[in-house]
Amino acid sequence: MMDLIVRTLSWALSLCTPRPRGRHRLGALPPLRIIPVLPPPPRCTELLDGSASRLVRPYVLDATELRRQRERRRAAFPATLGTDVGPKRIHPVRVPAASR
């Protein structure tokens, strides 16, 4: 079965590829030149110092920042429904009750 597949494929390839004829026929293939490839140099050779980095994550908020963030989010939610209820302070300036 394998021989039949090989013969069929070789026949199909002989139809698709041109046969070299005449003086410009391909002779013996030139020997392959093998070029050695050097591995890349290591990028990071020094050890990292763990005591030089901060242990506190910069995105962790304290309780007051979490409260302010929650207040801003609660004020923004009714605005999506068409009601404008703002925070009591905007850019550290107290907002009068009439404009809220």
Image: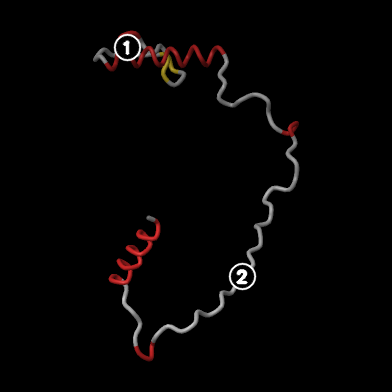
Residue sitting at x 70%, y 32%: 53
Give yes or no for contact between labels 2 and 1 (Cβ–Cβ under 8 Å): no
Residue at 75% over, 31% down = 51
Q: Could you tell me the amino acid type at mark 2?
A: Ile
Looking at the image, the residue that sits furthest to the top is 97
Which quadrant of the rendered structure holds the C terminus?
top left
Residue labelled with disc 2: 35
Residue positioned 64% across, 67% down in the render: 36
* Location of residue 22 in the rendering, given as x and y in whole percent from the top left corner: 35, 90
Q: Give me the disc on residue 11.
A: none
Could you tell whether 15 is left or right of 23 in the image? left
Q: Residue at x 33, y 14 (%)?
A: 77
Residue type at numbered disc 1: Val
Give percent across and percent down for residue 11: 31, 68
Quarter of the image for residue 81 reads top left
Spatial CA distance of label 2 from label 1 is 72 Å
Image quadrant in which you'd find residue 64: top right
**Farthest bottom residue in view:** 23
Q: Position of residue 72 (x, y in %)?
A: 41, 16
Helix, strand or loop at label 1? It is: loop
Q: Name the secondary structure under disc 2.
A: loop
Q: Quadrant of the N terminus?
A: bottom left
Q: Nearer the viewer, mark 2 or mark 1?
A: 2
Residue pointed to by mark 1: 85
**Horizontal side, residue 32 vs residue 95: left or right:** right
